[in-house]
Image (cartoon, rainbow, N blue to C red):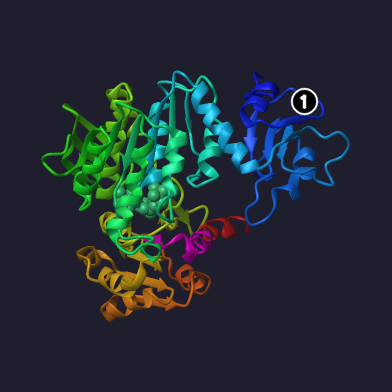
Amino acid sequence: MTALWDRDTLVAATGGRATGEWTGVGGVSIDTRTLREGDLFVALKDVRDGHDFVGAALKAGAGAALVSRIPHDSGEAPPLLHVGDPLFALESLGIAARARAKGVTVIAVTGSAGKTSVKDALAAILAPQRPTHSSVKSYNNHWGVPLTLARMPQETGFGIFEIGMNHSGEIAPLTRMVRPHIAIITNVLPVHLGNFDSEADIAAAKAEIMEGVVTGGHVILNRDNRWFDLLATKAQALGLSVVTFGENENASIRLLKLSQQSESASVEADILGERVLFRLNSVGRHQAINALAVLGAAKLAGADLARCALALGQWKPGDGRGARRRIRLDPIDPGSAFELIDESYNANPASVVAALETLSLARPALTATGRPGRRIAVIGDMLELGAEAERMHGDIAATPHMENIDAVFACGPLSRTLYDALPKARRGAWAVDSTALAPLVRDEMRAGDVVMVKGSLGSAMAVIVTALDALGQGRKKR
Ligand SMILES: Nc1ncnc2c1ncn2[C@@H]1O[C@H](COP(=O)(O)OP(=O)(O)O)[C@@H](O)[C@H]1O
Ligand SMILES: [Mg+2]
């Protein structure tokens, strides 16, 4: 195994002092539960102090630990790298990783919704063309970004980074570490409003991503978004090349045609002057719009666009972001299945409407009894919407996609407004939280139904997804 970092380079990059017997590390970890043998364990202080886990990390096979003090349980002459502040050292290591990867083309993604989807799709379509490195999950914050950088191998061809924020001023230092060649702002939506005075302030905070873009680099902006002008003005002031995507006829990456089937979509688009036809394994206009940014970035990064478009047709959205599966109520009877659309990861008004569109396009199966399945929406509270939160929940009830939905189950105090605004015939049930709602949804499921689960991360809608998955697994054991 060639080491990701050898001891001398680590010492030089962090200004630390190495003790114990070790020569290098194969990876970088901050969590003993996912640590791999040979990793450098970084003792970060978050909810708990990582120094409390150094002993366990070394026992689990960590190659060395990055610490600011010697933990009491780390044994005799432990392999350590001593620094003043492990987070600062991790940032330094990230910066060193970026500097030494001479052949890398870096793409950074921010936005109110779709960051992880765009990042994952990019990584999936670029990996077959050059060695590709990307963020794990949504590792997009003050430790997730430097950690992802520190993990980047020197020979990386494409580096893809998700950058997020809850407050203004958070993205600027992260993009300066990442130094992207291409920055994408998927959109600006009224989410995390709680921490901001206005939507314009959110736009300005997203715009910070441009501050780290390398000279001569590109920024890819959503032409359909109401904050486009504000973002473009900043890009021009910074001397960046502005590339736009969307349905707007002036977009340089433009959606020409979208035909949606029940589980997939065909898209025709103009990608920077090249006309491309491709398939998507997902439904919903937002997915097609995300795909434009993905293919545009891939082309700017120098990838083969035709191969990327083909690969995109193979890609599926991840857990909680539109992943679909069939769950059999009776393990030996394929006709007993219902379909789950898992949108449980996060929610804001735009993504809830998009998810309801996806559900309204789904085709419930005809069952053996001849009774068609139903379209069922399960919706939890959208959080961090600020003072207008209740009204925004109520507005969801009025989306035209609701017409095609048979029943809505809702949980949480804000979603009560949505629930009460629905006609009686469409009301399934309301409960105070997802734990209370889960059994009601579970008992409702019949063969042929399609159920879509959506809500903010803090609304814990994954509890309902788990309960629905258990319907399939539980009966298999019998
Ligand atoms: N362009 C978009 N507009 C609105 N909603 C979107 C968009 N892209 C994805 N979503 C939805 O937002 C949720 C979060 O998606 P994700 O890709 O994890 O975004 P993020 O990383 O920005 O939180 C998912 O339910 C997804 O379906
Ligand atoms: Mg994310």
Q: In which quarter of the image is the N terminus?
A: top right
**Would you name the residue on which mark 1 appears?**
22
Which residue does the image show at 58% across and 55% down from the upper left?
476
Residue 411 lies, in percent from the top left, at 43, 73
Whether the residue under disc 1 has CB within 8 Å of ligand 2: no
Range of residues picked out in magenta: 450-468
* Res. 317 in view: no
* Res. 252 in view: yes
The picture quadrant where one finds residue 297 is top left
Q: Decide: few, some or many residues near mark 1? Use Cα within 10 Å; few <14, some 14-19, many ≥20.
A: some
Instruction: Name the one closer to the observer, 51 or 417.
Output: 51
Which residue does the image show at 22% across and 39% down from the upper left?
245
Farthest residue, direction left: 249
Residue 238 lies, in percent from the top left, at 28, 36
The picture quadrant where one finds residue 293 is top left
Residue 19 lies, in percent from the top left, at 79, 30
